[in-house]
Image: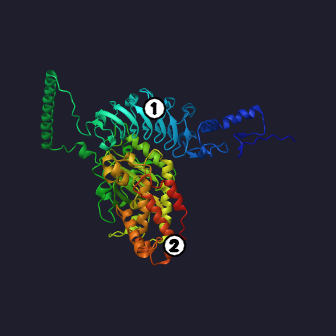
Amino acid sequence: MNRRSTTLFYTPHSSGLVINNNSLIILILIGFLVAPSPARCDDADILLKFKESLDNAVALSGWNLSQPPCDGARRNWDGVMCEGDGRVHGLNLNDKGLGGTLDVAILAELTSLRVFGAMNNSFEGPLPDFRKLGSLKNLYLSHNRFSGRIPSGHFDGMNSLKKLHLAGNGFVGPIPRSLTTLGKLVELMIEDNKFAGRIPEFKQERFTLVNLSNNLLVGQIPIAFSNLNPSSFAGNIGLCGLPLKPCVDTPKLSTASKVIVGISLAATLAAIVVAVVILTTRKRLPAPEDGPSAAHLKTPPPDELHGLERGGSEAELISAECPTPPPPEGKRPEQSMKLSFLVESRERFDLNELLKASAEMLGGGVFGSTYKAALGRGRTMAVKRFKHMNDVGREDFHEHMRRLGRLSHRNLLAVVAFHYRKEEKLLVSDFAPNLSLAFHLHGNSKGPPTGCGSRRGLDWATRLKVVKGVARGLSYLYAELPSLTAPHGHLKSTNVLLDAAFEPLLNDYGLLPVANAEHARKHVVAYKSPEYREGRRITRKTDVWALGKLVLEILTGRDGGELGAWVESSCAAASNTGGGGGEGVEVVFDEGLVGGDDGEWYGEMRKLLRIGLRCCEVDVEKRWDIKEAVKSIEELKGN
């Protein structure tokens, strides 16, 4: 009997499909059955062609045809960012040691490419013509060897561009005027170049991140940038105007000009007086009882509220100061109370269910307060209420949350869902039963919240487990959030949570782009680093400094801004009194590590102490990078 069969599969060493029947009809049928495959294969071929155009592409040796770049949203090739349709959405080639020139014509063949990052490499030459990638949203090329003048119209037509990072190159000449008309541009990082001349008049009003420092710019700062931090313009001695000192070389006005200015001032003062009178009159009038302030508050009635188990009040979680506005005609009312879920596999619950849950305040932090919410049926969530993200629009916030929602790592506390309001935001995540690392290191006079694990002394094995988990999670953030100079930004012991097995979970990561900039500069860990205190800059090693400080806190049981200096001075004193060779450094270790069964691990503790000091080195050039830190931490032994 003549049997005919067709087999369709990937082989480990082939570049495509193997078909052991060459019938034209079957080939046509297979073409329909595997419709997505040609697109993925095309992307693979394009990426390999791009790889061939690069110098020193050793870091991309895993790019080969043994498997496609993407399986749905899961990436198979290092540095590739995938969408659910299996297409290449972005490239993260930061810190790969790559060189040569960028062939944008090849990249333009990736029709779904929206993000391109190649920071901290050795690419050189003039800035390539990225107009060929007309749909590009984010472009990160900081800290390469690009040079030369960027033509005025170089960014014409790139209307989707939101984020442009060109810092630390050798660009000269004026800032391209084509940047001023890109309506979606919200980040412009061009510091540490040689841009010269006046800053053009930018028309955008929604910038969230701008840095023009350390260039050769002169003249008055445009109004669009007048509310930025002065550090954004440091190192440009010819600049003046808000937020810097006033410009003093203003030419004298003619008599006619003085008359016009006088009339304008008089008109402005008159308008202010009228406005004050109107506002004063309004304040004296009683608010109508049937107005929006009374009719549309959506706080549930008292009999539906559940009391907090420890302190606080329901108003802290079910906020009467955040009324739900009346829905537009034809729109379902519950849509304004919607939770946006980021983890598709999770069981759904709505915002009303969350707000009516039995809630217990866990604590307050830089960004806002955190609550434990018991939803019933064994479901317990942590809800963080943010009040310092009011500068962010709905679209940008949703996009950034989706970006964080794609992250998945054993040592990250996943953001399960979020709720956006202009006044405040809610982030919902799983509840960590053993609370924070800070609780176990330093205690809490009020004791743990109801249903939480009790404080316990942390032995060496547990502390090392925490350090390794934190390092792995941070390394993952560096790899997956290449556009963020400090991908965590707020690493500290209260933001390291512990699950039931005391595995660490990083929390509050990646939030700097959506935080209120002024508030962040006052309170966030990254802005307390030596490089920011001294030079008003955050670097790719800022989070490593925070890691080093955390390591020393874990070893010593102490907390404080000058922890590194205290450890060094204590070790020096111990060495002077106890002999050389590092003997006596046990004086800095936490009492929980000294005198017990962990004595055999003093050698490993000393190694970790040295790692911590190298990570929080004040001199950024001498400080380890994340790869050096993780490699050394992984080599330590603890059980």
Residue 69 visible here: yes
Q: Position of residue 553 (x, y in %)?
A: 40, 65
In the rendered structure, which disc, 2 or 1, sits on the residue that comes first in sequence? 1
Of the 4 image quadrants, the one containing the C terminus is bottom right
Colour approach in the figure = rainbow
Q: Residues within 10 Å of mark 2 (few under 14, many from 20)?
A: some
Q: Position of residue 321 (x, y in %)?
A: 27, 50
Q: Image height check: is 324 above or below 505?
A: above
Q: Amino acid at mark 1?
A: Gly
* Identity of the residue drawn at 43% across and 26% down: 153
Of the 4 image quadrants, the one containing the N terminus is top right
Q: Image height check: is 337 above or below 188?
A: below
Task: Determine whether the residue tagged by mark 1 lies in a helix, strand or loop.
Answer: strand
The circle drawn on residue 305 is: none
Q: Nearer the viewer, residue 62 or 230?
A: 230
How many labels were placed on the picture?
Answer: 2
- Which residue is the extreme one toward the right? 1
Relative horizontal placement of residue 286, taking residue 466 as reference (left or right): left
Judged by depth in the image, the label closer to the viewer, 2 or 1, is 1
Q: Nearer the viewer, residue 354 or 302?
A: 354
Mark 2 — residue? 601
* Identity of the residue drawn at 35% across and 50% down: 532
Task: Determine whether the residue tagged by mark 2 lies in a helix, strand or loop.
Answer: helix
Mark 1 — residue? 148
Q: Position of residue 583 (x, y in %)?
A: 46, 73
Q: Position of residue 385 (x, y in %)?
A: 35, 53
Spatial separation of the CA atoms under disc 2 and disc 1: 55 Å
